[in-house]
Image (cartoon, rainbow, N blue to C red):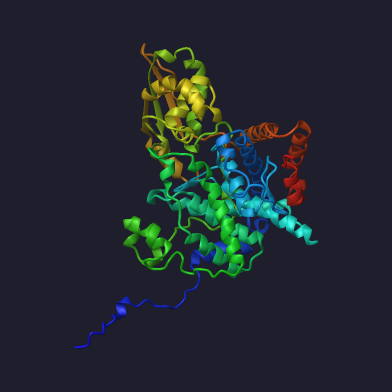
Amino acid sequence: MSTTSTISSATVESNVRPEYDLEIQKIADYVINYSIDNDSPNSADAWQTARYCLMDTIGCGLLALRFPECTKHLGPNCADQITPNGSRVPGTSYRLDPVKAAFDIGCIVRWLDYNDTWLAAEWGHPSDNLGGILAVADFISQQNISKGHSPLKMRDVLEAMIMAHEIQGVIALENSFNRVGLDHVFLVKLASTAVVAKLYNLPPERIMAAISQALVDGQALRTYRHAPNAGSRKSWAAGDATSRAVRLVDITSRGEMGIPGALSAPQWGFYDVLFSHTNKDLATKPEAERRFSFQREFGSYVMENILFKLSFPAEFHAQTACEAAVILYPQVEDRIDEIDKIVLTTHESAIRIISKKGTLNNPADRDHCLQYMVAVALLTGDLMAENYEDDYHAQHHLLIDALRRKMQVIEDEGYSKDYHDPNKRSIANAIQVFFTDGSSTDKVAIEYPIGHKRRRSEGIPVLQAKFQSSLATRFVEGRCQEIIALCDDQVALEQTPVNEFMDKFVIN
């Protein structure tokens, strides 16, 4: 008898290299060929909203520079490192390589949980992509000038923002990564990779190769966003994702081969490893259906409908709850000791993400607690980033926790339905306070926060005031007015070279 093993054909893998997955091709085709002006019926709205988004995102970053827990992450990886033509980090004197600059910009943008939001099957903050976009655009512009070429214009930055928003937001519409334990910053890495590759003017195959690298790169778990492990990583995770995108594009631009079947490869691909096998309903479907679902084609829908956080640095599912609490503040401020119970009526996603009992251990824990945010707003008539810090919590936690224990959180199925309705996308919350004498306040219900598309005309003046206040934390009055004048002029801003725009945010 022969001792040689017989190899079954069933164990031999076919080594026919596939075409790039259709989803990869779809993303690449969008960033290469889509024209916002020609293809979008609301292109003017998209460009204008992108300008407001740029202002708001940079402003959020400037506000975060007041917090040492944020700024300790900033600066070169090697002390005293000098990077010629390095990317600037707004509000600082840093000039860094694009990879680290993308991390730093992304870190400050996300730190206070105050930048824009997109809510669907998956949640996220598409302006997180500005970390990679701004760092790379600034670096390319300075490099071009040093070689006698033209810099990129801020219109290129706005276009990249619109496209990054669209990639992240459209995929998020019907694909829930949180339900399989993955963090939404996966979509930041994916979107940033695509648009950064476009900014570098890579050819189509190289853009697809870069996207494939982002898909196989390993994805972050949501552990750091949820009790009992919620912590500060959630504040720099997006900076890490957009920074990683810049690194992967750099690797790909040097000739690194792509992975065409990154999504669909049996057993080893994204779908089988990280998506389908944890969704039993998907696992039983034909292979063609075990893929990301696309509700709509890529365009500029997400930017046009983005949600801004304008009043409170709070997780977005709590924005209307905080607004309702502030409305109720005059009715309860002198009756705190008389409160018997507080009924919070909300939607399913808010309950799943931010409804918490027990000890809150750090600022990141507190800004993702619905009850904590509502308690502070009822006690003070406002909610600020400082209210999450350890020193504030140490002084006031007994009173805050007493109110938290009196809260009942219940779901309104209508709120949950309207949250997912593409024609509404409400983020409804209601609050009613009951007193020990049997009386109560009115039930204050708010469907749409001030940063919602349906309240855009009301929200933009608030956004502009927020931006102006943010600038004042870092710059003298003259510089503030110079920046505001530029950002208020759509045409002038779009034609401004990126390097000249970034010059205005340097601290000497």
Label count reads 0
| Quarter in which the C terminus is drawn | top right
In this view, 297 is above or below 111: below
Residue furthest toward the left? 1
Name the residue: 52% across, 35% down: 448
Where does residue 332 sit, x and y in percent of width and height? 47, 16
Residue 447 locus on image (x, y percent)? 49, 34
Q: Quadrant location of residue 152?
A: bottom right
Of 295 and 32, the residue lying toward us:
32
Q: Residue furthest front?
A: 79
Picture coordinates of residue 170 (x, y %)?
Answer: 52, 53
Above-or-below relation of 394 to 455: above
Q: Residue at x 40, y 34 (%)?
A: 355
Q: Where does residue 96 sit, x and y in percent of width and height?
A: 66, 50
Give left or right: position of 224 versus 47.
left
Viewer-side residue, 251 vs 407: 251
Residue furthest toward the bottom? Answer: 1
Residue drawn at (26%, 82%) of the image: 5
Task: Specify the quadrant that holds the N terminus.
Answer: bottom left
* Residue 41 at least partly seen: no
Asked whether residue 400 appears in the rendered view, the answer is yes
- Tell me if residue 330 comes above or below residue 76 in the rendering: above
